Image (cartoon, helix red, strand yellow):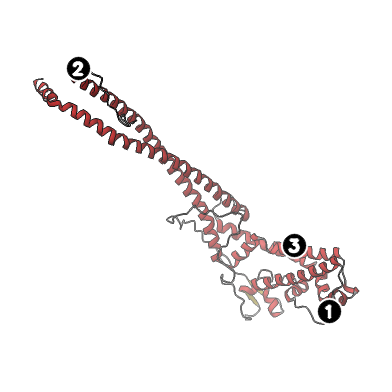
């Protein structure tokens, strides 16, 4: 007890306690309170930033899910089905049905073909050069082998497409930039064309009468002849549109005069011919049909589509995990804020108490004259 009394005596000697109290007051006002205020501001701004990030992630997740749902619907893939390659390969059988539907419409182009041929023959004295269209009208959608050699093959050996499931996330370590999300309404350029996929027109080679490779494909399935056919119907469409325009304007152009009355068609008949061509174009230019055609002839293209599909799945998972991480970070900021605010109030309260005691002590030294410690933000408030 004597030791403590001695310590107290020394502490009161030369007003050491008063100097220490003033130093503590200065430290609180100049350092501790500003630091805590900065920490509180940081915690508040951190929560605001987290709220913004969570909102951005929510929008990105919704956009990505919408894109994925569009992709699933486009290729008829169930939500719980991640066997993307197998599903697409199973859908390749739909191409035959598409080609059959196209051929049903092609048969109705015979009148248009005869009309175009007669018109050109009468006006120019030459024959039209719609080779593939003429072949399809006369022979149907035969194999490319029969188109080349004029005889049916004794055997057709079509390429067998095998599936190697690869659900491996190859982009797990790649950083994703969410600042430029694609518009789902825009077409996707997958960076692969049939010219690059390895599909080439083979030189005529007769191996007995067996149709292999490209020769085993049908006219509409073969890349070159399908494009030639599309060019043929586009040329026919241009001619019919021109004739329809002339009839609609009731002009006396050179073409109309030279054509003669025997091959003139009425506007309803021309419109009917054009409608058939539009149906054929819609069938062949359908995005899913184009995808399936490239898938059938290019394993590389199939791998690219699968990579895009899996990337969307993985992106959604990554964004959800990131959103959870940001939510946890926001919780940490909130906890820090809840700890700092009471701490700041306590220091401010102690400051007021310390100032009161210093004022009282100094007042005693000057016969209880009123003493006030004043200054800007003296309480650190």
Asked whether, in this view, residue 180 is left or right of residue 149, the answer is: left
State how far apart marks 3 and 2 are (Cα).
Answer: 109 Å
Asked whether, in this view, residue 215 is left or right of residue 1, the answer is: right
Q: Quadrant of residue 361?
A: top left
Towards the viewer: 236 or 130: 236
Looking at the image, how many numbered discs can be counted on the residues?
3
Lower position in the chain sequence, tag 3 or tag 1: 1
Asked whether, in this view, residue 346 is left or right of residue 202, the answer is: left
Give the residue drawn at x 69%, y 64%.
284
Give the residue drawn at x 12%, y 26%.
14
Q: Quadrant of residue 269?
A: bottom right
Q: Which mark is residue 277?
A: none
Identify whether 64 is placed above or below 229: above
Give the residue drawn at x 62%, y 73%.
214
Lower position in the chain sequence, tag 3 or tag 2: 3
Q: Quadrant of residue 353?
A: top left
Question: Pointer 2: what residue?
Answer: 367
Question: Pointer 3: what residue?
Answer: 279
Identify whether 371 is placed above or below 49: above
Mark 1 or mark 2: which is in front?
Answer: 2
Towards the viewer: 249 or 11: 11
Towards the viewer: 16 or 76: 16
State how far apart marks 1 and 2 are (Cα).
Answer: 129 Å
Q: Which mark is residue 123?
A: 1
């Amino acid at each position: 007890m004597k030791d403590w009394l001695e310590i107290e005596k020394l502490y009161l000697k030369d007003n050491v306690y008063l100097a220490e109290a003033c130093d503590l007051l200065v430290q609180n006002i100049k350092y501790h309170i500003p630091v805590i205020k900065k920490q509180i501001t940081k915690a508040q701004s951190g929560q605001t930033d987290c709220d913004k990030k969570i909102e951005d992630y929510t929008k990105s997740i919704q956009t990505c899910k919408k894109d994925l749902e569009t992709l699933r619907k486009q290729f008829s893939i169930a939500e719980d089905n991640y066997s993307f390659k197998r599903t697409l390969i199973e859908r390749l059988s739909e191409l035959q049905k598409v080609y059959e539907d196209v051929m049903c419409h092609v048969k109705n182009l015979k009148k248009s073909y005869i009309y175009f041929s007669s018109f050109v023959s009468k006006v120019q004295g030459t024959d039209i050069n719609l080779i593939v269209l003429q072949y399809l009208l006369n022979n149907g959608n035969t194999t490319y082998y029969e188109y080349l050699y004029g005889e049916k093959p004794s055997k057709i050996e079509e390429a067998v497409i095998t599936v190697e499931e690869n659900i491996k996330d190859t982009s797990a370590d790649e950083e994703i930039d969410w600042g430029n999300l694609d518009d789902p309404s825009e077409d996707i350029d997958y960076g692969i064309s049939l010219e690059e996929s390895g599909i080439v027109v083979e030189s005529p080679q007769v191996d007995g009468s067996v149709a292999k490779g490209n020769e085993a494909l049908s006219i509409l399935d073969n890349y070159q002849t399908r494009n030639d056919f599309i060019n043929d119907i586009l040329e026919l469409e241009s001619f019919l549109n021109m004739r329809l325009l002339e009839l609609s304007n009731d002009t006396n152009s050179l073409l109309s005069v030279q054509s003669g009355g025997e091959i003139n068609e009425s506007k309803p008949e021309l419109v009917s011919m054009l409608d058939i061509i539009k149906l054929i174009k819609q069938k062949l230019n359908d995005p899913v049909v184009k995808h399936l055609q490239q898938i059938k002839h290019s394993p590389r293209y199939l791998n690219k589509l699968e990579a895009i599909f899996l990337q969307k799945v993985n992106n959604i998972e990554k964004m959800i995990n990131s959103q959870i991480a940001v939510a946890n970070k926001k919780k940490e900021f909130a906890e820090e804020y809840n700890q700092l605010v009471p701490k700041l109030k306590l220091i401010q309260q102690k400051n007021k108490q310390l100032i009161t005691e210093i004022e009282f002590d100094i007042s005693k030294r000057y016969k209880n004259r009123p003493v006030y410690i004043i200054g800007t933000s003296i309480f650190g408030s």
